[in-house]
Image (cartoon, grey):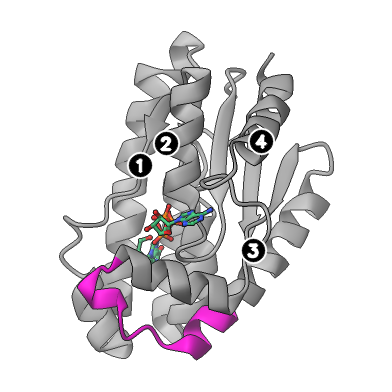
Amino acid sequence: MNTAPFIAVEGPIGAGKTTLACMLSERLSLSLVKEIVEENPFLGKFYEDKDEWSFQLEMFFLCNRYKQLEDTEKKYLHKNAPVISDYHIYKNVIFAERTLEGKKLEKYRKIYQLLTEDLPKPNIIIYIRASLPTLLKRIKKRGRPFEQQMDELYLEQLIKDYETAIKQIKKDDPSLPIIEINGDQEDFVLSEAVFNRIADQVKEYIG
Ligand SMILES: Nc1ncnc2c1ncn2[C@@H]1O[C@H](COP(=O)(O)OP(=O)(O)OP(=O)(O)O)[C@@H](O)[C@H]1O
Ligand SMILES: Nc1nc(=O)c2ncn([C@H]3C[C@H](O)[C@@H](CO)O3)c2[nH]1
């Protein structure tokens, strides 16, 4: 079990996780762990044909995050250095439960359990909640080509899946600090005051 602050920023696609994680990493001198996106060989294919590519994609994300978190433990947490990551490992389950079914989902659950049981788990979560119009606006603004035909139903389901997952995480561990941000209204990019408030809240937890 790690005792160093390990913060995970979570929320649905385009909520602003990477943006906020980078800003907080700089402000609070935290080591930053960022999800691999551009080098992912299956993401574009997945958005073209989800049924065909979902298992490959979910496994790629899982193995990648496994390696990143293994390294994070060795390089930082083990040495008591605080870390902020733009994802929580549980994100794998949120997506896989939505994109996989039948035998593939069963296999995935087993592999997830095996790979993640001894990985470090975040001890602070920042959850950015945002509505469909806000997410679509941000995905468009970011302009990744393979995300521009984003299925709105998929995104809407993920918004709900995230809500369910956060409720479950709270139930499983009521003492886990979760900082919740209303991404539609609390704009930490445009408003210095909003960002300062979030940074102060995080600072209180990490001491
Ligand atoms: N509060 C905000 N106000 C305005 N624009 C924002 C805000 N937060 C993020 N953005 C912009 O929205 C886009 C998506 O942000 P970002 O990449 O941080 O999201 P993400 O949650 O990490 O996405 P993903 O789930 O795809 O990893 C970027 O272009 C970013 O500059
Ligand atoms: N299917 C699936 N499973 C995941 O674990 C996962 N994690 C991120 N993503 C997608 C969302 C953004 O398009 C892009 C960047 O976050 O990658 C995922 N998609």
Q: Are marks 3 and 2 in contact (CB under 8 Å)?
A: no
According to the picture, the residue beneath numbered tag 4 turns out to be 193
**Left or right: 96 in relation to 143:** right
Front position among marks 4 and 3: 4
On the rendered image, what quadrant is the N terminus found in? top right
Q: Position of residue 102 (x, y in %)?
A: 46, 86
Amino acid type at mark 1 = Lys
* Residue 128 position (above or below residue 86): below
Q: Are marks 1 and 2 in contact (CB under 8 Å)?
A: yes
Residue farthest to the top? 79
Is label 4 in a helix, a strand or a loop? Answer: helix
Gap between marks 1 and 4 measured at Cα: 25 Å
Amino acid type at mark 2 = Cys
Residue 22's disc is: 2
Q: Is mark 2 within 8 Å of ligand 1?
A: yes
Q: Nearer the viewer, residue 66 or 4?
A: 4
Q: Is mark 4 within 8 Å of ligand 1?
A: no
According to the picture, the residue beneath numbered tag 1 turns out to be 34
Is label 1 in a helix, a strand or a loop? Answer: loop
Amino acid type at mark 4 = Ala
Amino acid type at mark 3 = Asp
Front position among marks 1 and 3: 3
> How packed is label 4: few (under 14 Cα within 10 Å), some, or many (20 or more)?
few
Q: Which residues are magenta?
A: 143-157
Residue 184's disc is: 3
